[in-house]
Amino acid sequence: MSYLSNRINNLSESQTIKMAKLGRELAAKGIDVINLSFGEPDFNTPNDVKEAAKKAIDENYSYYTPVSGYPELRKAIAEKLKRENNLDYTFDQIVVSTGAKQSLANGVMCLVNPGDEVIVPTPYWVSYSEMIKLAEGESVFIDATVETEFKITAAQLEAAITPKSKLFMFSSPCNPTGSVYTHEELASLVEVFERYPNIYIISDEIYEHINFVDKHASIASFDSIKDRVILINGFSKAYSMTGWRVGYMAANKEIANACDKLQGQITSGTSSISQRAALAAYQSGLETVHQMRDEFRKRRDIVYKLLNEIPDVKVNLPEGAFYFFPEVKAYFNKSFNGTPITTAEELCLYLLNEANVSTVTGEAFGNADCIRISYAAAENELIEAVSRIKTALAKLV
């Protein structure tokens, strides 16, 4: 019997991290692996952000920070939310954390009791279900498919609600599908939430600025439910600051105070240098952000065309983030050199070993018929990677 806790034994390993690790192991052997498994922009952090971090070191920002973040950063976040999203928050409704992942976990831990149900549209980001598990809640999944652009309807939402429903958790733009909910689509969901005042909403908006259609729509913009929304965002995707680990939530004061209390017992405040860099990011404008978005749009269009040339791969055109989530179930129950491929995970391992392209199984995101492909890579790598995938899939019989 393991001496480890049931809590950790029941927790699943992150599949994105697992596949990236396997890819690195092959690369260490001298194999040319193209990594399309990680959700990380391949751009460098903007220079003015890096300069602000260097200045912070010289100015001795080297001491413990307030648990919820420096007041000046929290005020800058509140100003950003007003300026870019027309959302009114005071700085004491903002909690800065060590990445948006911690912000999400804080929200789940502070809201969910054992046995509470958390409604999650699928596909979902890999860690949602595991966070719910750690809080001893129960995940209730609503399935969405490529035919519906991986978005749920108000009728599906209402059908999933029970007396145990406590929380709804989703992302837009979505990881892993790139789907973006419009203002009108969110309004239809809000009409349902208005009838159930005991349900809270975690809205993961970390891909806000990687949006190829309209101005970003936040469910927090609906006054009737705003007090029940926990808005999650951060700097990793828009400013290519993944390693800096700065995210935040905006919520009502009771929830913000609860998350400050929880964080104070687990990590305390986020890195002082990273916070000063984040402050500079929000003071620097959106020029580099939009340049990166436009590059991602260009890459998306290239990969979309190439994926559509692969037989029996069903793919939609994502409107945000930097992922494709193609349906590949037509290749299940085929084999290579007598070895059968029966699941998306086995297909991903086959593509890694045969095509030397790292992807992620859709099972990790709640849809076992798909795989996730990140196009946060250089154009030449993307063209080569899809070519390798097409060749490898053609070998299956």
Image (cartoon, rainbow, N blue to C red):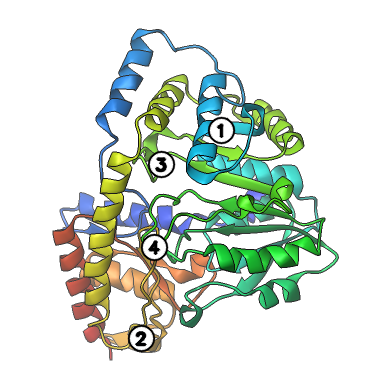
Q: Looking at the picture, which amino acid does disc 4 mark? A: Val
Residue situated in front as seen by the camera: 163 or 47? 47
Q: Which residue is mark 1?
A: 78
Bin the neighbour count of mark 3 within 10 Å (Cα to Cα): few under 14, some 14-19, many 20 and up: many
Indicate the quadrant where residue 191 lies. bottom right
**Counting residues from the N terminus, which is met first, the one under dot 4 or under dot 3?**
4
Q: CA distance from mark 2 to mark 4?
A: 32 Å
Precedes in sequence: disc 3 or disc 1: 1
- Name which residue type carries label 3: Ser
Whichever of labels 2 and 4 marks the residue nearer the N terminus, that label is 4
Residue assigned mark 2: 331
Q: Earlier in the sequence, mark 3 or mark 2?
A: 3
Q: Is 183 placed left or right of 25 in the picture? A: right
Callout 3 secondary element: loop
4 and 3 marks in contact (CB < 8 Å): no
Where does the C terminus fall, quadrant-wise?
A: bottom left
Q: Residue furthest right?
A: 163
* x and y percentages locating residue 301 in the rendered image: 25, 68
Q: Are marks 3 and 2 in contact (CB under 8 Å)?
A: no
Between the C-alphas of marks 4 and 3, the distance is 21 Å
Mark toward the start of the polypeptide (4 vs 1)? 1
User: Is residue 319 left or right of 290 when viewed as pictured?
Assistant: right
Give the residue type that dot 1 points to.
Ala
Amino acid beneath label 2: Tyr
Q: Relative to residue 173, is residue 20 drawn left or right?
A: left
126 and 124: which one is in front?
Answer: 124
Which of the 4 image quarters holds residue 303? bottom left
The residue wearing badge 3 is 236
- Which label sits on residue 377? none
Distance in Å between CA atoms under marks 2 and 1: 48 Å
Question: Where residue 213 is drawn, which disc sits there?
Answer: 4
How many marks overall? 4
